[in-house]
Image: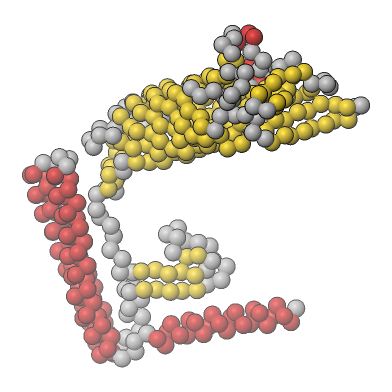
Amino acid sequence: MKTMTFIALAISLTFVQFVTAQETEQPQNVKETIALLNAEKEIIENEEKEALRVEIEAIMKRYEDGEITQDESIKLKQEAAERRALNIENRKTIIANKIALIERNGIANDTLKDNGYTLSIGLGTLDRDDNTRVFGIQYKNNNKVKDTTHHDVRTFSEFVLATSFMYSSVNDQSLSNSPYDVSDSGSFELGISWNTRVFKNTNFLRFKYGLSFVWNTYSLDDNNYFVVDGNQNNIVEFSEDLDKSELRLTNLVVPLFFEFGPSKKTIENGVTSYNTLHKVKFGIGGYGGFNIGSMQKLKYKVDGDRVKTKEKRDFNTTDFVYGLSAYAGYGGFSLYAKYGLNDTFTDSTLQQNDFSIGLRIDF
């Protein structure tokens, strides 16, 4: 209890010392304070002129890009100049009023708190909405000029989640003769993608690219499992009754698509963007990547005891994977299909290509 009391007292003294330091470090001499305020007038003028220069450059870029006409650019530049001139006048008036207040009362307390930099420390406070307070410590630049430039958002990112049934053609046999249980074989994808507008003034065509982890699971039927014999993969019958027999391949791939479809253009707070929510879209392309892991999982019973084994090895799988893919959907949901052009196994009697069809979600 004494320790807690001492800690609380130490924190309180530290906080009081900090607040006292803030108060004593503020300019107390009237002449010095007035001199600082007069110097700030020049800073204000330079800030507003710099902001005007940035605005005009943004307006000229929009004119050069064909987004606005010459008359519109002249009007926008005039409005920006008038606004900045009024800002200079108003901000200097505020400084003049502060100087008059100091001269009239002969004191200089708390006159600079709205300008420059502010540092404050508090305990038990929540983070502020503007993210300037972290764990009770707030830092704020009061001289920061608001960014008024025009931004054109040409690229945006999405999280991708996809799941599908997977059909494997083995040695050109029909699906009815496939060694896999189609209802229990599938593919799962998790990744991130970026959409970039191809043309400057229309979002009808987008280039979509990203990075994804893909897990392909092959569920063997008829109590069979994989046995590796040198460079050959053999499907043989297991000695016990299998509850589960599956081979899972983990791939790291780069999907590439051209995406088509309408979108809604919005301009808000100087930011131009295109929204594809509640819009129809189509994508066509492919993927390429690497197989980074293979594992066979078996589940069965021996004398009533449950046994689960996991075997991680090469299984003669292809290192480089690639294929074709397409999707069609509405908003964030799409039906998609993909076909693997590479053989699943190398130098094996099992010549296999995979075809998947399922649901894709772009967050």
Residue 259 occupies quadrant:
top left
Query: Residue at coordinates 72% horizontally, 80% vertically from top-left?
Result: 3
Position of residue 362 measured from the top left corner of the image (x, y, whole percent):
47, 33
Q: Residue at point 43% right, 69% down?
A: 139
Residue 297 percent location from the top left of the image: 72, 30
The one of 160 and 274 positioned closer to us in this rendering: 160
Q: Is residue 159 above or below residue 149?
A: above
Left or right, 139 with reference to 98 = right
Does residue 362 appear in this view?
no
Q: Nearer the viewer, residue 29 or 117?
A: 117
Q: Of residues 186 and 4, which is closer to you in this image?
A: 186
The extreme front residue here reads 230
**Lateral position of residue 119 relative to residue 9, left or right:** left
Residue 315 rendering spot, x and y as whole percentages: 65, 30
Numbered marks: total: 0
Q: Is residue 43 above or below residue 320?
A: below
218 sits to left or right of 110: right
The image quarter containing residue 45 is bottom left
